[in-house]
Structure formats: C-alpha cells, structure tokens
Image (cartoon, helix red, strand yellow):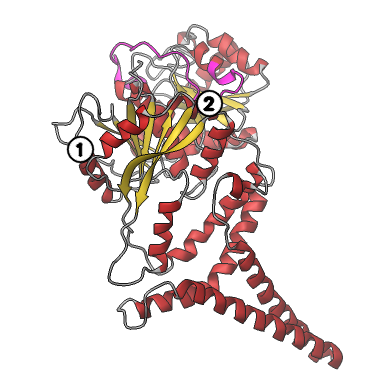
C-alpha cells in the first residue's frame, strides 16, 4: 500500500503511564482537513515487561484514524519504536511521527506537522518538533525540573520527531542495544545523517510536563553513562560534537572518585604501616589520605553547590526537601556514574555497527516448514511446504546456523507422546537435513511455562545452544506467537502468513513475506536488517482449525 507524500502514522512507545490517554485525547482534538490531514493510524507499543493486561487506549469514533496496540515486551524505547514503525509502515505512510507517551499536543499541532512535512524536500530524512517544558513560576526549578527542561534545547529528541520511512529503512531504525531513553535518538540522527539525509527543525510545538519523580531519580539516570560508552564505541571520541550533544560532567565525577580512592588507599596503607611499625610510611600514607579526603570534600561540595544554587531559595517550601535530595545524591552520583561508564566500556568493548549481523535462522515447524496437521504424531503425514528444502539449504549455504522452535502442546494435553513428536521431528530432519538445534515446548497453555511461544524461552535456549546472541537470530514463523516470542527474546522475525494467520497478526508483524523462500531471501539479502521485508503477502484465507496454532 502506498499513500500520498506527506502522509504519516504516529508511533507511541508506552510503559503504561496514565498520561498516554491524555496524549491521545489531545491528538483527537486536533483540527484536520484535506490540506492538513491527521495520521493514517496510531500505533501504541506496550513496552511493559511480562504478561500484563493489554493497554486499551481509546479515541472518539469521530476521528478518521484508529489506535492499534502491539507488544514491546519491556525491551526499551529503541526496540519499542522499531516495533512500532515497522508495523505502521504497512499503512503506506511516508513518515513516522514519534511521540512520547507523556507529552501533550497543543491546538494546531497536526496542522503545523503537515506544514513541516510539506516543507521537507526529498533530501530531508527527519523533522523535529519544538519542545516546551512548563516550569513553576513562583519559585526556581528543582534539579529534576531543570533536567526535564533540558529537552527544550535537545537535538533530535524523539519526544516529537518525524522520520521519513525511507530514512529509517536505510539505517534499519533505532539501535536496540540502547536500553533506555537517553542516547538512542542521537545515535539514530547520526546514522541517518551519515546515510546522506538532512535533519531539520520544524515549527510545530509540543508540551512536555515534568512528571513526578522520587528523591533518587537523579541517581538512577546515571545508568545513561553506559550509553555514553556505547556512543563512543560506535561514533568515536568526538561523538558529542557530531551529535550536537552538550558536554557532560563525567571528568569531574572521575576526579571525585579518584580522590575518594586516594583517601581510602591512603587510610588503608596508614593502618598497615601502623601495624608493621613503619612510621615514615605511615606519615606519607596519612598525608595522601588527607589530600584525597580534602579533594573529595571540595569536589563534592562544588557539585552540591552547582546543583543547589539554581534551585529553590531558602524560604521556599521546596527548599529543604531539595537540599536534602541534593546532599544525599551528590555524594553517590560520582561513584554511580563511574561504575556505569566502566560497565558500558566493558560490555561494549567488541560492539560493532547496527544492525548486528544474522548468524542463525530459527524456523517454526508446523505451518512454516511442513504443512500443519493438528497434533500430528505420524511421520508419514509430514509434508514439506513448497520451497522449504531450498530455503533451509540457502541458510546453510550462507554459513548460518539453523534451528527449529516448535510448540507441541499435544504432549501436555495428552494427545501425543514425546516419542511420537520425536519421530515426526526425525522425519522433518530426513527431508530437510540436520538442524543445529531443536527446541520444543511440550506444555499445554494452562501449564504457564516459560518456553511456550509467545514467551521467549525456546528462542533464548536456541541462541544459547548455538553460541550466538538472541539479537543475531531471526525467527521465521506463520503466526503472531512466533513474532512475539522473537520480540520478547530480542531476536528478529519474519512472518509468512498461512490460512491460520489472523489479520491483526499480519498487521502487527515487523516484517512479512509471501513465501518461505522470500522470507529467507530477505534475511540473506546484503545489508538486510531486523526490519527487512519481502513483498507484501497476499491475504490468506480465514483460519480453518484453531488446533493448528499449537
């Protein structure tokens, strides 16, 4: 499906905050017309981990667009946005407008967005909205309020950022190795620019209220230092200038930790020297400890002042609570920052560019490799789907590992024995050649196991047995449970619809292929990434047998 230039879909990653409905309400209230149309659709990505009651956001019947919810499985905003835009592009939208679930759209936003998109020439890959953070007028803002207000000057923040679908496809979307909302937007902007696109600022505006936070929020956000380490690994030591990011305070944190370490080491050495009777060594160690303690005290005091002076003044009701927060967290933040940066350096020491290469292809069995015979225990009833042998051989010829992940609830339901399932699997191996891993779930749905798709257990087990990361795996299957299992595990997926595939499963899938051979060809294509998609699949006939879904 292809829509007119300037058409867009909205993608909103959400962790279930109540502000989501208010965002949709402000979107529903926008004035739109033929010259300034609304979105083709809105895709909300429910990024809460685990098995949760689905989000059910609503919009008035009077709007021309609908809200569709897909699962993100708690893998962070980068992965959630990827899931959303890959599902939304099936609407034919030329642009994806990313919004955070805690922003508000003022009147006229949709009309200004339409104007911003119309002003973008073919060389423009993205346009950013302007962010306004309302701050209290009766007092100076707190540290957390100032932190949120920094979004007003942030470059390429996806709180309101519209990307051309072609630009997202060119770089394979967001780098999902960024697990939090911190640097994934700057990384995407850099890669889109390097791919030859321009990024511009539009005229539309959004409101980003300061959301409530507890006293330790400033300590938790130090985890973003690990993302800084990943940015350096991917974009070099000059990444801040390239990404137009403000200079950080990490060097001061490192100096503070070094001073604390000097004080501790000096005290330890003095204690040892005292026990051994080395007076001169003891004096030198005490001097080092004193110097380190003095430096730590000065650096920590400086940090407290830098965070406190711009904030509420004495006499303000918020002054004492804010001072307490600043004293407690300023002592701990330098250590947390250094620890997270070191963790990031170590974790990403061998990290390469995005997307990560495919090293293994996992296949669903029934409906994907072989025709689905519900609860089949007869090897003679095994029949390959057209092109199955060629598809699997192509994966092997490319040097990739191959495996099977299959729900076999007939065992748990008492309809099949494990021996019967093993005999059928042996026949599949006879017809298709050996697989590097077989993973099957023998449980019935009511047994609530961790391995049954759409849960990720079998995908994770297959990746572990093959010695690859889940992100280096692609799962090819025929129903939504295959797609969801891959998403939850951090793997990629391609859906090959069959008569049992539901329309909503096709709509939510990040990538769809018409046949198994097309799915494998898309995975093996040079430069293929997580969202690679073959030609749109024809709509299969309605499902004939519910039992065929395993």
Give the left or right position of residue 331, taking residue 292 as reference.
Answer: left
As helix, strand or loop, the secondary structure at mark 2 comes to helix
Rendered view: 514 above or below 309:
above
Give the left or right position of residue 39, taking residue 522 as reference.
Answer: left
For the point 51% across and 32% down, the residue is 198
For the point 49% across and 26% down, the residue is 123
Q: CA distance from mark 2 to mark 1?
A: 31 Å
Rendered view: 395 above or below 282:
above
Placement of the C terminus among the 4 image quadrants: top left
Residue 510's x, y, as percent? 43, 27
Which of disc 1 and disc 2 is earlier in sequence?
1
Splitting the image into 4 quarters, where does residue 212 fall?
A: bottom left
Q: Which residue is mark 1?
A: 28
Residue 334's x, y, as percent? 58, 68
For the point 45% across and 75% down, the residue is 308
Q: Is residue 206 magenta?
A: no
Rendered view: 219 above or below 67:
below
Residue 371's x, y, as percent? 43, 12
The foreground one among 167 and 527 is 167
Which residues are drawn in magenta? Answer: 522-550
Q: Which residue is mark 2?
A: 170
Residue 115's x, y, as percent? 32, 32
- Mark 1 crowdedness (10 Å alpha carbons): few <14, some 14-19, many ≥20: many
Residue extending furthest toward the left: 62
């Amino acid at each position: 499906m292809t829509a007119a230039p300037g058409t867009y879909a909205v993608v909103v990653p959400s962790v279930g905050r109540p502000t989501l409905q208010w965002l949709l309400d402000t979107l529903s209230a926008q004035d739109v017309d033929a010259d300034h149309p609304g979105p083709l659709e809105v895709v909300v990505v429910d990024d809460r981990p685990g098995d949760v009651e689905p989000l059910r956001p609503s919009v008035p019947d009077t709007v021309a667009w609908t809200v569709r919810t897909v699962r993100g499985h708690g893998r962070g905003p980068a992965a959630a946005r990827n899931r959303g835009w890959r599902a939304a592009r099936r609407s034919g939208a030329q642009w994806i407008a990313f919004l955070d679930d805690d922003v508000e759209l003022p009147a006229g936003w949709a009309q200004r967005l339409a104007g911003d998109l119309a002003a973008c020439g073919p060389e423009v890959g993205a346009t950013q909205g302007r962010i306004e953070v309302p701050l209290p007028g009766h007092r100076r803002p707190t540290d957390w309020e100032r932190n949120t207000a920094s979004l007003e000057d942030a470059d390429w923040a996806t709180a309101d950022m519209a990307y051309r679908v072609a630009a997202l496809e060119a770089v394979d979307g967001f780098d999902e190795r960024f697990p939090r909302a911190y640097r994934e937007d700057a990384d995407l902007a850099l890669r889109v620019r390097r791919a030859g696109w321009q990024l511009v600022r539009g005229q539309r505006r959004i409101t980003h209220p300061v959301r409530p936070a507890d006293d330790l929020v400033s300590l938790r956000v130090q985890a973003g230092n690990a993302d800084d380490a990943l940015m350096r690994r991917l974009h070099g030591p000059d990444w801040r200038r390239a990404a137009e990011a403000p200079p950080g305070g990490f060097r001061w944190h490192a100096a503070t930790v070094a001073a604390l370490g000097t004080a501790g080491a000096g005290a330890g050495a003095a204690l040892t020297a005292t026990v051994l009777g080395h007076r001169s060594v003891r004096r030198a160690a005490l001097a080092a400890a004193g110097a380190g303690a003095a430096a730590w005290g000065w650096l920590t005091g400086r940090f407290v002042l830098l965070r406190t002076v711009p904030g509420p003044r004495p006499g303000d009701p918020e002054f004492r609570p804010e001072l307490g927060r600043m004293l407690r967290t300023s002592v701990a933040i330098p250590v947390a920052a250094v620890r997270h940066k070191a963790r990031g350096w170590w974790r990403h020491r061998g990290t390469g560019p995005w997307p990560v290469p495919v090293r293994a292809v996992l296949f669903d069995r029934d409906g994907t490799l072989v025709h689905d015979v519900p609860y089949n225990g007869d090897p003679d009833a095994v029949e390959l789907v057209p092109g199955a042998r060629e598809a699997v051989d192509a994966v092997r010829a490319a040097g990739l590992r191959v495996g099977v992940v299959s729900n076999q609830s007939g065992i748990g339901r008492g309809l099949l024995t494990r021996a019967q399932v093993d005999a059928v699997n042996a026949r599949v191996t006879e017809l298709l050649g050996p697989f590097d891993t077989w993973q099957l779930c023998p449980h019935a749905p009511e047994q609530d196991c961790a391995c049954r798709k759409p849960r990720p257990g079998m995908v994770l087990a297959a990746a572990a047995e093959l010695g690859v990361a889940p992100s280096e795996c692609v799962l090819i299957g025929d129903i939504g449970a295959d797609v969801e299992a891959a998403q939850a595990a951090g793997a990629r997926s391609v859906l090959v619809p069959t008569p049992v595939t539901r329309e909503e499963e096709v709509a939510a899938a990040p990538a769809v292929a018409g046949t198994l051979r097309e799915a494998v060809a898309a995975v093996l294509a040079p430069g293929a990434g997580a969202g690679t998609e073959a030609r749109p699949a024809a709509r299969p006939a309605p499902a004939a047998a519910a039992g065929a879904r395993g």
